[in-house]
Image (cartoon, rainbow, N blue to C red):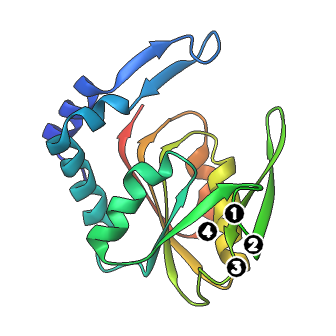
Amino acid sequence: MASQELIAKLEATIENISDFPIPGIQFKDISPIFLDPKLYEEVIEDLVKFSKGKVDAVCGIESRGYLFGIAIAVALEVPFILIRKKGKLPPPIISEKYDLEYGSAEIETREGQIKKGQRILIHDDLLATGGTTEAAAKLVQKQGAEVVQFSFLIGLKGLNGDEKLKKFNAEIYHTLEY
């Protein structure tokens, strides 16, 4: 959906940092996007186009999912709901545990902010293996809402994140794929 012009601008802006945070990893630093307000606006327009008229709320995954997620929700004129790491939100909360390569983690959202029957977009900056996003989708479902879309600025091919999310029968969008 993203125009070739937007893709080219983003590819020229996003910095590749070799061997960060550990050797062998090619880190995609999105922070230079925020130095260019017009480019940031174009990214939001692209992501909004994907979701316009299709969602009742946006859930953003801590913390980089907030960078674009809040602006998407504002542009769509729908609520923005925080999905945070365990222990960061006041009660009452709903939580979901999930496994990582090196252990396990837990995410939470405030009880009552996601409404039964809502159509939800889950947004994060990057999709890799999909574990955190899968847990976020389960968190949404626990509250009787439906995940209808996932959006990401970047999708990493070969890590099978899309495969993990297909079971939710939701649309999946990446502005860029590497």
Q: Is residue 38 or residue 151 the one in the foreground?
A: 38
Task: Please give the name of the residue rendered at 65% of the width and 14% of the height, measured from the top-left corner.
Answer: 22
Q: Decide: is 56 above or below 121.
A: below
Q: Which residue is at the front of the view, 122 or 148?
A: 122
Determine the residue positioned at 38% across, 32% down. Answer: 30
Amino acid type shown at disc 3: Glu
Name the image quarter holding the C terminus: top left
Asked if marks 4 and 1 touch (Cβ < 8 Å), the reply is: no
Counting residues from the start of the chain, the first of labels 4 and 1 encountered is 1
Q: Residue furthest right?
A: 103
Question: Label 2: few (<14), some or many (≥20) within 10 Å?
Answer: some
Looking at the rendering, which quadrant does residue 35 occupy? top left
* Closer to the camera in the image, 74 or 49: 74
For residue 168, the mark is 4
Q: To which residue does mark 2 refer?
A: 93
Specify which label sits upstream in the sequence, 3 or 1: 1
Q: Which residue is mark 3?
A: 111
**Residue located at (49% from left, 51% from top):** 65
Give the secondary structure at mark 3: loop
Q: Tell me which amino acid carries mark 4.
A: Phe
Per the image, the residue denoted by label 1 is 89
Name the kind of residue labelled 2 in the image: Ile
Q: Is residue 122 above or below residue 147?
A: above
**Cα gap from disc 2 to disc 4, whole angstroms:** 23 Å
Q: Are marks 2 and 3 in contact (CB under 8 Å)?
A: yes
Secondary structure beneath dot 1 equals loop
Extreme residue toward the front, this view? 90
Residue contact at pointers 1 and 2, CB within 8 angstroms? yes
Q: CA distance from mark 4 to mark 3?
A: 21 Å
Q: CA distance from mark 2 to mark 3?
A: 5 Å
Give the Cα separation between the discs numbered 1 and 2: 7 Å
